[in-house]
Amino acid sequence: MRKILISVVAVLAVGIGGVYLYPSAAILTAIKVRSVLSTTQVAPPRNVAWEQGPAAASAIPLARPPNIVLIVADDLGYNDISTFGGGVAGGRLQTPHIDALARQGAVFTQSYSGASTCAPSRAMLMTGRYPSRTGFAYTPMPPSMGRAVSLVGSDMDRTLPDTLYDAEAAANKPPYDFQGLPPDEVTLAESLKARGYHTVHIGKWHLGRENGMAAHEQGFDESLLMASGLYLPEDHPDVVNAKLDFDPIDQFLWSALTYANSYNSGNADQFEPGGYLTDYWTDESVKVIKANRNRSFFLYLAHWGIHTPLQATRADYEAVGDIKPHRLRVYAAMTRALDRSVGRVIAALEEEGLAENTIVVFTSDNGGAGYVGLADVNAPYRGWKITYFEGGIRVPMFVKWPARIAAGQAIDTPVAHIDMMPTLLAAAEQPLPKDREMDGENVLPLMSQGVAAQTEWSRQTLFWSSGHNRIVRHGDWKLQIAARPEKQWLFNLAQDPTEQMNLAGARPDKVSELMALLDAHAAESRAPLYEPEIEAAVAVDKHLALPFEPGDEWVSVRN
């Protein structure tokens, strides 16, 4: 792979048409990223004609199966919300609506994402199954992204080990829209639809757009899809942008993304959203709640916030105050919009008299990203998105259901995204699919039956995997192994929750025990649906704006 990277860089360095193409902006121009990604015409904003439920209810809300609202943030760091005593910019930004949701239900204090990147994690939320069963192991990348990120990173002459690009793997993958969750997987939406729920998806999907893999083909009656990824047009009078000149991914996104969504059409029939993306999706979610107040519904609100590119409304930017640096202020303003969204959704449920018998779940797809160049987003944990240290996979998981779940609970039992589908189906009294193995567990008893259920909880083991990185948590012990660099990390999370003391050398017996679990898991795993095209190094303890120095720990992840 290294030879492939160097040869492509050399071609571009010589120039196309005799023109020297550095710096990195010229590389992106040479790759023609925008022309590849933006071939669909984007129409002006339009009103979404949401399906309207019955004009009158056939039963009082408490007699119906519970409504379900699943809110998933993107790249939200554990310390970005003030629920755990932190908050963006040293706590200058508080998240009162998210904090209130946590107080009003159950907080899982050891909750994990399904993966350290978004798409596999979202697939596990939707299926309750590991990638070892579905084959959906890597986050699909748009055309040219892998090549652009590797080239731009090389052009920057960063001190981290090179990002490696595998052109053969990229060429052999299906087109971007066909890289998704196989249609024969049974999703949470399909199961709830079979129970009689009206199912609605709003926002990010990232599990395929064609060939039966789009959200509206995977069990959602209606899908308002994020077709691209700008929160507002870059030159909009009400937007404040923050570009990250140290991040190759950010440079790609600004070159590639447009401002577009679609309704029940996958990647076709795109039109502009009706405002700042976080607020617009919230507006539409409120409409969905009102339209379905007289029947059971499942709303999957999959926010793009607070993923890059960093864009905030000018009103939020002004409201958070004089926070420095600029990118941190924009990041804080985006988090403020996300918190406001949660508050507005809860308020809509209350206004419609639905709050008592509605399950509201709030989580994030993975930990905060080091490539935004901000410290402490995952404090007190080490690591970032893309790594499998706790900072990359520890996420909030709050569940509110006043009819069944007592407020003010803090539950220490480790849980993960694979548990979401079994739990929500149990709450809806809908059986799990019987024709396949499920990896998740129903955690509803942990919330509704108190200490007794927590004491009787039997599952001890959780797995993660991404290429050569294999991770297992068994009881309080966590083992992570990698091939680049070739290393093992062993931590006792009960004694060392922030992973400061690597015990791999001191406890070979525990390493052997956990390796046996990893090997058994690998032995029954299916191959990935497609191979990753890049391998990128990530510093464990430094964000990307800081120099990488000899002796700093790092790990590489393939995607």
Image (cartoon, rainbow, N blue to C red):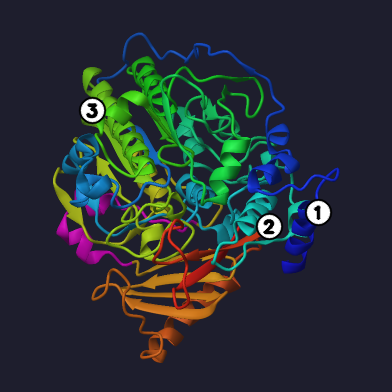
Q: Local crowd at mark 1 within 10 Å, few (<14), some, or many (≥20)?
A: few
Q: Amino acid at mark 1?
A: Val
> Does residue 117 appear in this view?
yes
Asked whether 436 or 487 is in front, the reply is: 487
User: SS for tag 1?
Assistant: helix
Q: CA distance from mark 3 to mark 2?
A: 45 Å
Q: Local crowd at mark 3 within 10 Å, few (<14), some, or many (≥20)?
A: many
Residue hosting label 1: 14
Q: Give the number of the disc on residue 355.
A: 3
Q: Classify residue 375 as left or right of residue 3.
A: left
Residue 185, x across and y down, in percent: 58, 46
Asked whether 357 or 559 is in front, the reply is: 559
Q: Earlier in the sequence, mark 1 or mark 2?
A: 1
- Magenta-highlighted residues: 438-458
Q: CA distance from mark 3 to mark 1?
A: 63 Å
Residue 284, x across and y down, in percent: 41, 20
